[in-house]
Amino acid sequence: MQSRLTDEFAVIADIHGNIDALDAVLADISARGIQTILNLGDHLSGPLEAARTADRLMAAGIACIRGNHDRQLLDRLPGAMGLSDASAYAQLTPAHLRWLGALPATLEPMEGVFAFHGTPQSDTTYLMEQVDAQGRVSMRSRAQIEAALQGCTAQLYLCGHTHVPRRIDLGQGRVVLNPGSVGCPAYSDVQPVPHVMQTGTACACYATLGRHAGGWHTSFHHIPYDTGAMVARAKAAGREDWAQALAHGTLT
Ligand SMILES: [Fe+2]
């Protein structure tokens, strides 16, 4: 039997106000007997259930970091927000905003582990993916990822932001992992050029990890849940794009 150096823990990210997906994931984590959860940001933005999601996360005491869409709920006036951020902001109380404002941008939850939303320096930059001038998305080379992590000495790097579950091994046992998105399996963005990120599944996604003598053991979990209420919420807000993404995990 291989020795386990740390207990297994769960990593979640990019909930985007999808309370039903979050509850499905939290139930699955609990059923596995996992106590420790790390949440990599973008908790609330979108036309779904921002306030209920904030209440759930605050009550659960889950370690959270701040994503770009969490920061954008704090650093600009509602009139300057995008549609998804403005939808979430309209639901939030001062207590929710205080909670968001206290979250760190990066976290070292245990020795050798470094967590952030995009890259260590930026909550809006993709770490493992790149977008070309035509909007085509591809995986970055290991050299590019190493360059983005220059000066960092962790063995395990945890990021969110792209909503795409992925593990890349950098060598010398160093691992980069994105657990995928709990609540938003596809989206379009106009930065740096218009492009679409999509997973092809409506499932809520997260990862579990454990450090063993031979390296990091990681598992990705895709949890089916009833998307009906969240799809209806998106449609009621006039967000057909969100409704399609939630129902199918695709936008094209
Ligand atoms: Fe996100």
Image (cartoon, rainbow, N blue to C red):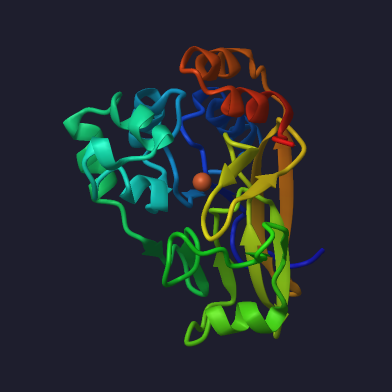
Q: Nearer the viewer, residue 175 or 61?
A: 175
Rendered view: 159 above or below 175? above
List x then y, in percent, for residue 158. Answer: 56, 62
Residue at point 78%, 66% (across, down): 2
Give the side of residue 248 with respect to residue 227, left or right.
right
Rendered view: 68 above or below 5? above
Give the image quarter of residue 221: top right
Q: Nearer the viewer, residue 162 or 104?
A: 162
List x then y, in percent, for residue 125. Answer: 50, 64
Q: Residue furthest left?
A: 94
Give the image quarter of residue 134: bottom right
Q: Nearer the viewer, residue 74 or 99?
A: 74
Rendered view: 58 above or below 38? above
Residue at point 30%, 52% (across, down): 103
Rendered view: 58 above or below 243? below
Give the side of residue 38 with respect to residue 217, left or right.
left
Q: Quadrant of the N terminus?
A: bottom right
The reply to whether residue 186 is visible in this rendering is yes
List x then y, in percent, for residue 47. Answer: 45, 25
Residue at point 28%, 44% (across, down): 100
Give the image quarter of residue 170: bottom right
Give the side of residue 55 with respect to residue 177, left or right.
left
Q: Quadrant of the C terminus?
A: top right
The reply to whether residue 67 is visible in this rendering is no
Q: Residue furthest front?
A: 134
Residue at point 66%, 40% (across, down): 205
List x then y, in percent, for residue 23. Answer: 54, 26
Q: Nearer the viewer, residue 51 or 217?
A: 51
Give the side of residue 68 with respect to residue 170, left or right.
left
